[in-house]
Amino acid sequence: MKIELSRSPSLPWIAISVYAIFQLIILMTWAPLEKGELNVFLTSIGVVTLPKPYADFRTISEGIPYYEQGGDPYGSSDYDFIARKFNYPPIWLKLSFLGVEESELRYIYITFGSLFSIGLGLLFLREKNPLWFLTIPFILSPPILLGLERCNNDLLVFFLVVLAVWFVRDQSKKNMDWIGGLLILVATVLKVFPVFAFWVFIRNSWKRSMIVLLPFACVCLGYYLSIKSILDLIRENTPVSAFLSFGIKVLPYYLSLKFSDSLLAQGPWLLAVAFFSVVLIFLVGYRLGKEGEDLENFESYDTALFRVGSGIHLAAFLLGSNYDYRLMFLLLTLPWACRKLSEVGPIRKWMIFYLPLVLFVFWMNGQYGETVLVLNELANWSIFFVLVALQFKLLPQFVRDTVYR
């Protein structure tokens, strides 16, 4: 059953508050961030600062002129101030206007940060839950501040994904699905992994879902095939960290470094155990998801955000190793999680377990020591398990009929 979205005449004070808080932070931090005056504070809460701010966007702004002068930023690190090779899709190298001077980087920071702020506002635009304030420690957390300090383009992708879900769930006008799909397509071209946000279109029936999904699937497939060789280079050029990352490969990578003299650490054994654990988690999640969630509010905005945010996070986890700023996509799961926490029902116990886990991985990383690093990764694996089980529980009925027949 489709639930029509009601429009409240009152101002969305929660969304305005969240947007205003974060936008104020953007406007207040760019100047001290450039001068290094925030480094001591950022380091104290687990954000690893680099010699220059906006380091991730510098890879783009310095890589563009290097590429235009005939250099190969995928094969050489000469252009980068900390010797990194380019690890973004080639579209970024075509955006000449982003090859800005050092003095202009602040405007990119303000733009990306402001768009992220708008995304946060959209995230809570329909929020009326009195527990919304519980999300503030997540929003003002080290992974989000790390994304800001690096001026990572995941901030832009976050905005595009949330805006896309907003359009898809606002069916008051025609063609909203196609507008949302185009936004996800743009995000996919910019960063590859947002393709999993198309999961938002799996709803109501196979026919309606496929009408939207198939055209975009063909375009994405053609795009990936056209840049396949570049995708291999991106994977090779993406740095791996055991201390500021999450993903299926992080714990095996850390253990292989820790016990390098052990026979267990030789070869792919640890990674094989990790992949076996993933298979086991999916099997258990499938079994637990057999008793589905009440789908009366399946079409609700916060449910759609949860499905998309958790889907992106699961995919990012399986892709290998991601820097902690990509945890920002778990913010999409918070409105639904807080609503379920305030309701009586079987999902509430999942949220009592889930929200503290997310808070832990947002605030604790390997910079606090090896014990915390291991606990952090175990918490990330636990989040992965919870989200797998909940994705099965939230399957649309027509998919459930196929999966659990």
Image: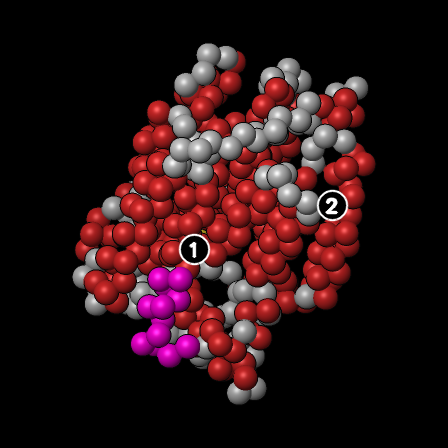
- Determine the residue positioned at 53% across, 37% down: 305
Disc 2 from disc 1: Cα separation:
26 Å
Residue 101 lies in magenta, yes or no?
yes
Q: Which mark is residue 271?
A: none
The tag earlier along the polypeptide, 2 or 1, is 1
Residue 231 lies in magenta, yes or no?
no
Q: Is residue 143 visible?
A: yes
Segment tinted magenta in the rendering:
100-111
301, above or below 192, in the image: above
Kind of element beneath mark 1: helix
Q: Which residue is mark 1?
A: 115
Residue 217 screen position, x and y as percent = 74, 51
- Determine the residue positioned at 21% across, 62% down: 32
Tell me the kind of residue under disc 2: Leu
Q: Which residue is mark 2?
A: 213
For the C terminus, the image quarter is top right
- Determine the residue positioned at 59% across, 65% down: 89
Kind of element beneath mark 2: helix
Of residues 386 and 329, the one drawn nearer to the viewer in this rendering: 329
Q: Tell me the mark number nearer the camera, choosing from 2 and 1.
A: 1
Tell me the kind of residue under disc 1: Leu
Residue 118 screen position, x and y as percent = 42, 50
The answer to which quarter of the image holds residue 136 is top left
* Number of other residues with Cα within 10 Å of mark 2, as a class: few under 14, some 14 to 19, many 20 or more: many
The answer to which quarter of the image holds residue 311 is top right
Residue 300 screen position, x and y as percent = 57, 29
Of residues 190 and 181, the one drawn nearer to the viewer in this rendering: 181
Is 211 displayed left or right of 322 in the figure? Answer: right
Q: Is residue 384 visible?
A: no
Residue 249 screen position, x and y as percent = 52, 46
- Determine the residue positioned at 35% across, 74% down: 104
